[in-house]
Image: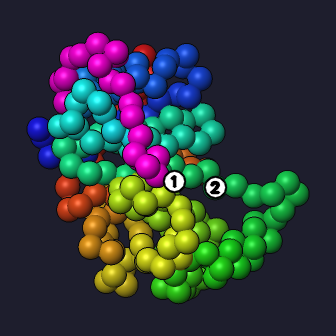
Amino acid sequence: MDQKTVVCIFNINDEREPEERLALAARRAFGIDASPVTWELLRGKKGKPFFLHHPELFLSISHSGPYWVCALSGERVGVDIQARTRKRGESREEAETRLSRMAERHFEPEESDYVENGRAGTPYQRFFEIWAAKESYVKYTGQGIDGSFGQFSTAPEDGNIIRNRLPWTAEGVWFWKEDIGENYVLCVCTRKEKPVQVEWITD
């Protein structure tokens, strides 16, 4: 199995069943041509999905707004997509204040500091980058969102900044993010630094 990670982005309203999307993604990503019925999903105790008939392939699924996203790899993987949102009538400055307070309550201190004082983007942008990284991490580990969510840090260990398509390391794993337009951020978590290929499925 090729060690790359492939992220396939679908329109959530494309009328496909998840198994149909996964079959198409596997064919595009790894040349695996198998019927959608063989892509049956099961879930572990905390909800992490796995393939019943394709144990050689690992996956993670996320969706937000118009996007349905899956990451496929020959190794464990986690993916998350987050919408950068504001409350109705809330200004950007008000959102930044609210999200900075949320980061203080729910993030590890290094992450909260990164949201407030990072050198790239705005606190508003950095909050959702860290949130997507944290969710991709708990999907990678399979632990899900639980009481430990604020006890690990996905902020870059080297004190660097988070940039599009430039991987960074934290918690002994690697993260990779890409902005999807202005309003969404996608993050992938893998065991080691490896290429991440993004495929938009529009047919």
Q: Which quadrant is the N terminus positioned in?
A: top left
Considering only vertical position in the picture, is 12 above or below 72? above
121 left or right of 189 in image: right
* Residue 103 quadrant: bottom right
Q: Which mark is residue 84?
A: 2
Marks 2 and 1: CB-CB under 8 Å? yes
Image position of 105 (left or right of 168): right
Give the CA distance from mark 2 to mark 1. 7 Å
Identify which residue is drawn at 55% across, 71% down. 147
Q: Nearer the viewer, residue 134 or 93?
A: 134
- Residues in magenta? 30-48
Q: Residue at x 37, y 77 (%)?
A: 156
Q: Is residue 174 visible?
A: yes
Q: Position of residue 70 (x, y in %)?
A: 40, 38
Specify the quadrant that holds the C terminus. top left
Residue 128 found in image quarter: bottom right
x, y percent for residue 49: 39, 41
Where does residue 153 sit, x and y in percent of width and height? 43, 77
Type of the residue with mark 1: Val
Snapshot colouring: rainbow
Q: Is residue 31 above or below residue 45?
A: above
Q: Residue at x 14, y 46 (%)?
A: 3
For marks 2 and 1 on the same chain, the one whose residue lies earlier in the sequence: 2
> Residue 145 versus residue 87: which sits nearer the camera?
145
Characterize the local packing of mark 2: few (<14), some (14-19) or many (20 or more) Cα atoms within 10 angstroms: some
On the image, the x and y values in percent for residue 17 come to 48, 20
**Residue 6, can we see it?**
no
Q: Is residue 33 magenta?
A: yes
- Residue appearing at x 48%, y 79% in the figure: 151
- Badge 1 density bin: few <14, some 14–19, many ≥20, Cα 10 Å: many
Q: Which mark is residue 185?
A: 1
